[in-house]
Amino acid sequence: MRICIVGAGYVGLVSAAVFADWGHHVVCIENDLQKVTRIQEGDLPVFEPGLPNLVKRNVQEGRLLFTADFTHGIQEQDLIMIAVGTPPGDNGHPNLTALWNVVKALKEYARSSMMVAIKSTVPIGTCDAVSRYLNADTEFRFDVVSTPEFLRQGTAIADFLSPDRMVIGCRTDSAKQILKKLFEPLECPVVFTDWQSAEMIKYAANVFLATKISYINTIANLCEEVGANIHQVALGIGLDHRIGPAFLKPGVGFGGSCLPKDTQAIVALGEANGVDVSLFREVLRLNHEQHMRVVKKLEKCLGGLEGKKIAVLGLAFKANTNDVREAPSLAIISRIVELGGQVIAYDPAADMEALRRLLDFIPAADPYEAVTGADAAVVLTEWEEFYGMDLQRVGDLMNNRLIIDGRNLFAPQVMSQYGFHYVPVGIPKQAPVFPITK
Ligand code: UDX
């Protein structure tokens, strides 16, 4: 097939590279010319393991092309796939400017009928609105399809190649057949739906995951108080197949470009439609409280943060990505600084210079530099580099052997052998003594 993908973010790039690898001819349109040049030179705008090689190979073999030329890129394609960003906009609703710019350009420059798949996460009703707009006053037919994606950053290629399911919202049989053929290499169930249901599935899935995280974080916080161990509890819960073991890792709260934004969007959708969505509002509030819990633990252990030097290990919203959008580190660092603390932070991939324009912290070249002279260290991202740290060296460099671990990277027994006061999530330091009630 000849496929045009609009948008070279992590979804667009991964989709483009994999389709090309399957032998399709793919043009990826990105309106930022500088980005196009950088991609062509092998410098990808996203940190995604495995992606640089996949892109490079398919570019070299002539199946994958990047361009900023929209008019040229969309002509004579079997499928146009829109994968532009829909960042948070006003009042919790996503900002659809980029999407509509693409749709308007499609209508203006189309020289034939075409199939248009929307991969960007869009509010329910968008496919319908796009289809009505494209098909009004034109000699061409635009067959609009909703193809939501469920890729996680950091494992996007593996997720693309082994999805749990494909969801395709379409109205015509021809669209159904073409997409069925396109996704033939994937061995997974394909759920064909109407447009609205496909759009809703994306939101409903992300909001379910967000809810699951706020749920397990609440259980973990309770475990800390009552002497239970969240690892054992999560295992015991997760083996119930109605619940499942995934997304039961407690931590510092969820971040990233999707879960917070999509939960906000569902809340906004509920408000606009008079539906009680207080459950999801609470998921967001609890998530913020989970970020703040790290700071409260610090304050409690240090007796206040005024003048204290805090090492922050990890800024990205999770490991294996350089993305700091809605990362828990942003809220946590801001609060530490607000309370008079000084932050020295290290992350192996995040763009430190961009972050320093937003936040007040000193960047460190490695974790050891970050912890030097620190009164406490907080672990906010589960980078592999942190597992392998020389703990003796870390302890020797610190002013205080205090680690607040928001990701449960270390075994508490090992940490106490190294003399750390170690505060993980959902694992109490010692079992409480309960009153005997008869
Ligand atoms: C998410 C969805 O998983 C994906 O399907 C969708 O397409 C995009 O949004 P992503 O944002 O890349 O993917 O990350 P994900 O792995 O889902 O993690 C989201 C956040 O939840 C991270 O901050 C992560 O640290 C946190 N998390 C995840 C937990 O705190 N505990 C868990 O058990 C799982």
Image (cartoon, grey):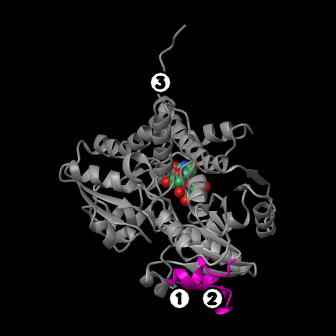
Report if residue 386 is visible in the image: no
How many marks overall? 3
Q: Is mark 3 on a helix, strand or loop?
A: loop
In the rendered image, residue 7 lying in the magenta stretch gets the answer no
User: Label 2 vs label 3: CA separation?
Assistant: 64 Å
Residue 64 falls within the magenta-colored stretch: yes
Question: From mark 3 to mark 1, how far is it between C-alphas?
Answer: 63 Å
Q: In this view, does 209 lie to the left or right of 434?
A: right
In what element is the residue under mark 2? Answer: helix
Image quadrant holding the N terminus, namely: bottom right
Q: Which of marks 2 and 3 is nearer the N terminus?
A: 2
Residue 76 badge = none
Q: Which amino acid does label 1 sit on?
A: Gln
Q: Do the residues labelled 2 and 1 touch (CB within 8 Å)?
A: yes
Q: Which of marks 3 and 1 is nearer the N terminus?
A: 1
Residue at image mark 2:
59
Q: Position of residue 265 (x, y in %)?
A: 48, 46
Q: Mark 1 points at which residue?
A: 40
Q: Quadrant of the C terminus?
A: top right
Q: In this view, does 10 lie above or below 424?
A: below
- Up-down relation of residue 431 to residue 103 (above or below): above
Foreground: 214 or 151? 151
Direction top: furthest residue: 438
State which region is magenta: 51-77
Image x and y of residue 168, in percent: 71, 56
Task: Give me the disc on residue 433.
Answer: 3
